[in-house]
Image (cartoon, rainbow, N blue to C red):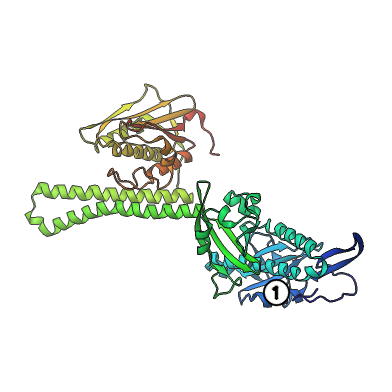
Amino acid sequence: MRPGGAVVRWRGAVPAAAAVRKVDVTSKGRTVGEVLVFLPLDRPLVAWLTRKTDLGDRRRIGLARAGNLVDAERTLRIQSGTLQANADDIRLGGLGYRAVAEDLGGSPSRVKLVTLERSSYIDSQANTARWRVMGVGFGLIAALLALAYAVSPSIARSRVSRQERARAERVLARVGDGVFLVDRDGVIQLWNPAAEAITGLRADAVCNRPAEETIPGWPAVAARIPVARRPGDADDASSAETVPLDVGGREVWLSIVGVTLDDGTVYAFRDVTRERRLEELRSQFVATISHELRTPLASLHGAALTLLEREHDLSAPTQHDLLDMIAVQSRRLADLVEEILVAGQLDSGSLTVVTEPFDPEELVWTAAAAARLRVGDDTTIDVSIPALMPKVVGDPGRTRQVLMNLVDNAIKYSPRGGRIELGVEADDVHARFTVRDEGLGIPLGEQERIFEKFYRLDPDHRRGIGGSGLGLYICRELVRSMNGRIWVESDPGQGATFTFELPVAGRVTAPA
């Protein structure tokens, strides 16, 4: 068979690089012969596919075999990299490409169909290029299937149709993204393993059933999905759309795109729930930081403007109060900036943490003395330390930062004042630092999440409690960096006890 669907008689041996199909011919229940159809996997096929798919200047396709790539014009040696179903970087003819490859059926020659695009262009437009390259791959697979279906009726219609569908399912089973086929009647005909893994919907529960009955909210979702007429067409709607899907009470965000076929539409999607969550956290962080910056900046601006315009009309105590306000609010801004910088260093792994023995008793007394300067008469700061305490191994500066963060939280979440107790005790292995308050407490369902980045118990500031949502995250990561752990125990309305432990000097262990 030649590209384009032309069937010609072949004389000689079957080429080594060919997609072969053999069908038995039966008459009255007896096999009377066989028909052997093969498609040469050579340069003419690549040239035909290139013309049909209209790849443009940046993209190309080819057939890979034994370390070489045959495109529409020449044969090039693959210099480095591997060809696989997931996108990977290769080097070809001295240039870098991003390539996606699929084995062509069960060909003994191990020929792969490859789609390529220049790595430099992908780096600048990674997301759009990825989906277009994947769309080209799906379009090529669809073209091969359509080509095979074109000759099936003349050989053995029903049997070949079943075999081609099985082959398509085997090919798509290896694709990492979810892929499914909805026919023109709205019935799901194909649901690959990746789609099953991402959504949790089993293939046997959705195949041969209407999409609107099996995929939650499908009519609304389908209306938003761009469906391209041809993969890679710049004038077509081929960019992916991010849509939510509620599966069994679990919200899944999918980046999905579609390509039309003669008998329906092929949809390809990937799970972007984590990326969506990170984007929401970033938006929440920007809103929180904006709110946290607004108050000190307004105070600083008002105090400075008053001093500037009415300096000679203000009494000495008033000037002192305004200067004190400027000092307090500038310190608040500096602390906020420090939290953001430390969080960034923790994420990048560039934060320096030393390991040395230090006196935990002195550290607790110092933290308590600093806290007493910040509370009113309605709050007392107590210290509980046993008579004998061993040295603790860690970074004394970072340990003090953790302890002060916990004390600051105890003060903030004790709006009616009360008793705040700092303590430390030790056994043969660990020293345990505690900060106990009598404040608002923490709901049981929130006690694990409060250590997440940007998470706040009062995100809408209904209680008037500020914060960046980074303090407890920084505490957890600093304690972990010193080979320790941190946790909280609390009942709503009855205060909270934060505890973190570090190794004592007698039992130092190397970082994992």
Observer-nearest residue: 348 or 54? 54
Residue 485's x, y, as percent?
A: 47, 35
Q: Give the residue drawn at x 27%, y 44%.
A: 464
Image: 318 above or below 8: above
Residue 147 can be seen in this image: yes
Image: 226 above or below 44: above
Quarter of the image that includes the N terminus: bottom right
Relative to 342, 374 lies left or right: left
Residue 49's x, y, as percent?
A: 70, 74
Observer-nearest residue: 5 or 288? 5
Observer-nearest residue: 32 or 248? 32
Relative to 372, 134 lies left or right: right
Relative to 204, 387 lies left or right: left
Dot 1: few (<14), some (14–19), or many (≥20) neighbours within 10 Å? many
Residue 366's x, y, as percent?
A: 31, 34
Residue 435's x, y, as percent?
A: 35, 32
Residue 68 can be seen in this image: no
Q: Quadrant of residue 426?
A: top left
Give the residue type that dot 1 points to: Leu
Quarter of the image that includes the C terminus: top right
| Residue behind mark 1 | 49
Q: Report the residue that reaches farthest toward the front.
A: 28
Q: Give the residue drawn at x 16%, y 50%.
A: 322
Q: How many marks?
A: 1
Image: 218 above or below 227: above
Q: Secondary structure at mark 1?
A: helix
Observer-nearest residue: 23 or 413? 23
Relative to 92, 331 lies left or right: left
